[in-house]
Amino acid sequence: MCGRFTLRKQNELLAYQLQMAEIPAVVPRYNIAPTQTVLAIRPGEHGREWALLRWGLVPSWAKSTKGPLNINARSETVATSPAFRSAFKRRRCLIAGDGFYEWVGPPKDKRARFFSLKDEKVFAFAGIWERWQQGETVIESCAVLTTTANELVKPVHDRMPVILTDGDYSLWLNGEAPPSELESLLRPLDAGSMTVRSVGSFVNSARNEGDQCVLDG
């Protein structure tokens, strides 16, 4: 699964690595948690556009926003799940990140492992988004797709987020792409391109922010 992640890069580099002409001014984030705002890229009327979405997808048909917190969608069932199938078919997006956390150990002494790319580049999680409206209240929200863990992540967790390479971005955002081609993207990233290290307990609280979250522990 994916329950916390980072986006630490400066704006100019971030826009370049996400293949965007510009993005909004974003503050480096070291502990992005569910219900917080994330930076996403999606198709727009004039090409790709950026959006700030709430992490935790609310289906358009939901009676309220108090239902399950859908931060992740399993790639194996995303095309058929009532909560996700419409978004998977019509509203796919890239969710910007440059690392993610998973925890190991007993409940009272959990320790995070921080996963990132060896070259420290920004990457994109495969995402889906939805628009929910009730009266004048509008919420645009998203979920990160997950897949089976690769050899690096597997000792910590049996699932991992779907991380797209920059060559996959156009296909994932293509509204005309056939399901078979999209499904080919929903695979674990090559473990050889990733690295992992232990970090301290500061990141355990979702209220904490700053570079102390990624310091060795």
Image: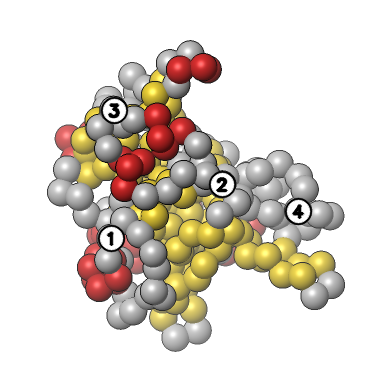
Badge 1: residue crowd in 10 Å (few <14, some 14–19, many ≥20)? some
Residue 22 is situated, as x and y percent measured from the top left of the image, at 33, 79
Alpha carbon of mark 2 to alpha carbon of mark 1: how far?
Answer: 20 Å
Residue, x 81% and y 67% (percent of image)?
134
Badge 3: residue crowd in 10 Å (few <14, some 14–19, many ≥20)? some
First in residue order: circle 3 vs circle 4: 4
Badge 2 element: loop
Q: Is residue 217 visible?
A: yes
Q: Are marks 2 and 1 in contact (CB under 8 Å)?
A: no
Against 129, residue 72 (above or below) is above
Q: Which residue is mark 2?
A: 34
Badge 2: residue crowd in 10 Å (few <14, some 14–19, many ≥20)? many
Residue, x 53% and y 59% (percent of image)?
37
Alpha carbon of mark 4 to alpha carbon of mark 1: how far?
Answer: 31 Å
Residue, x 41% and y 75% (percent of image)?
24
First in residue order: circle 4 vs circle 2: 2
| Camera-nearest residue between 49 and 216 | 216
Instruction: Name the kind of residue labelled 3 in the image.
Output: Gly
Q: Which residue is mark 4?
A: 65
Q: Which mark is residue 217?
A: 3
Badge 1 element: loop
Residue, x 50% and y 37% (percent of image)?
205
First in residue order: circle 2 vs circle 1: 1
| Camera-nearest residue between 31 and 210 | 210
Q: Are marks 4 and 2 in contact (CB under 8 Å)?
A: no
Q: Which residue is mark 1?
A: 9
Number of the front mark, 3 or 4: 3
Alpha carbon of mark 4 to alpha carbon of mark 2: how far?
Answer: 14 Å
Q: Which mark is residue 214?
A: none
Instruction: Name the kind of residue labelled 2 in the image.
Output: Pro
